[in-house]
Image (cartoon, rainbow, N blue to C red):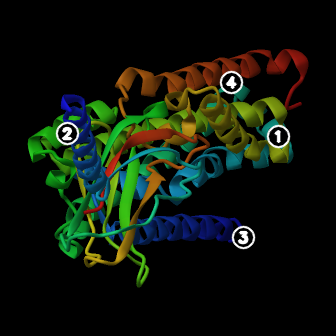
Amino acid sequence: MKNHVKIAVAAVSLCTLGSASAFADEATHSFNNVIPPFQQSHYMGAHIRSTSTTSSQIKFSSISDAQLMNVKAENLQNNVQYTELKGIGVNSASQIKNSTPAGKSSRLIITNYDWNVLSPTVIGTEVLH
Amino acid sequence: MLRLWPRFFVTLGLASLLALHLYLGTENTANSAYSTLAGVFGEYMNGLIRLVFPFIVTLLAAMPLRNQTSENFIHQTRGRTSLARHLLGLVKDGVAANAIYFTVFGLATTAAATFVVPALNPEVLQPTSYGLTAENALKLIAQQNPLGFAAAFGGIAFGIASTAWMVCSSTVFSLLAFACVLVTRRRAAILIPLGIYIGESVITQVLNAPKLSFLLLMPTPSSMGSFDFVTAALPGFVASILSCATIWLVIRYAPKYGWFA
């Protein structure tokens, strides 16, 4: 009987933790992407915004080849692109203007700061809210 | 009178290039934000000028020499003055023409980045959006740009430092262009510096050494994750040493082998 209780408690705990992490994943997304050369844009995955804040967040934990990045947000309902933040480096969270309303889908667009032949790999997290 | 027309068109072309550079740079800053004024200046310099820079420098520096070598004009002038003095005079004129043009170019860009852009777009500087204070943004740009140390003294100081770098870059490529024309003595020699500029940039970037590529160093150095002054100055220094050595060798051995004769 005691074992049954333990199993039940463990199952409930797993379900609770699982739903909590699923909730966190709704807004925060990790990425590991290769940015194309010659300042071609890399389009991140589209996500539906859960709140109507005026900014999204991006944080690069690693950018190869010592490159800097330009990032902007796009409202996929009307294809409006908001102010682009240029020359972003690693290890500080940057606020990207994003006025896409809650319930509408949006995405971030990353471009290399310099026009060159390199295809840097970028690793980090984005929070679209 | 006929000789005035090419000069008129060259001047008109250079003025048009500057106007286009300022227009496109201002246009690119319209829906953008930067952490410092150095970033705004960098936006202007990350445009058309990065690609056409070696061609403009060569046009200003080596066009007279190219015309003279292809028309055997040097041979005709040797009776009046020594070949060395004549060639060095052309080098001096070419370097001076580039220095004047790129001083105007750099100062005009500084004025646009420092005064025009903030007036048109008051939210252009947003260090807090980068998770930085204004002070920290200046410290960071000092690590990211070889001339970033000057940004601590203001946008104008950074612009002046960049203009000085631009003049040095134009001097390096003037010497390179002269060396190319002197060695080949062909009309097509005027395109060789452009080939060296693009070729060197592709090779260094493919070899994972983008900090040594001319494309990211000229006319002004771009910003990267970390970028120090000595590394940025190295390619230009080596190119100028090689170019000077080549010019000296040509002048030294031209009479012996009958070049320009």
Residue at disc 2, secondary structure: helix
Residue at which label 1 appears: B76
**Going by the image, does A1 lie left or right of B174?**
left
Camera-side residue of B82 and B3? B3
Chain where mark 4 sits: B
Q: Amino acid at mark 4?
A: Ile
Residue at disc 1, secondary structure: helix
Q: Are marks 1 and 4 in contact (CB under 8 Å)?
A: no
Residue at which label 3 appears: B2
**Distance Cα–Cα, label 2 vs label 1:** 101 Å
Closer mark to the observer between disc 3 and disc 1? 3
Rendered location of residue B199, percent (x, y): 70, 37
Q: Is residue B94 visible?
A: yes
Rendered location of residue A77, percent (x, y): 41, 82
Could you tell me which residue is drawn at 45 percent across and 41 percent down?
A122
**Distance Cα–Cα, label 3 vs label 1:** 21 Å
Q: Amino acid at mark 1?
A: Gln
Closer mark to the observer between disc 3 and disc 4? 4
Closer mark to the observer between disc 2 and disc 4? 2
Question: Around disc 3, counting alpha carbons within 10 Å, would you say few (fewer than 14), some (14 to 19), or many (20 or more)?
Answer: few
Residue at which label 4 appears: B247
In the rendered structure, find residue B191 and report the number of the disc placed on it.
none
Chain where mark 1 sits: B
Closer mark to the observer between disc 1 and disc 4? 4
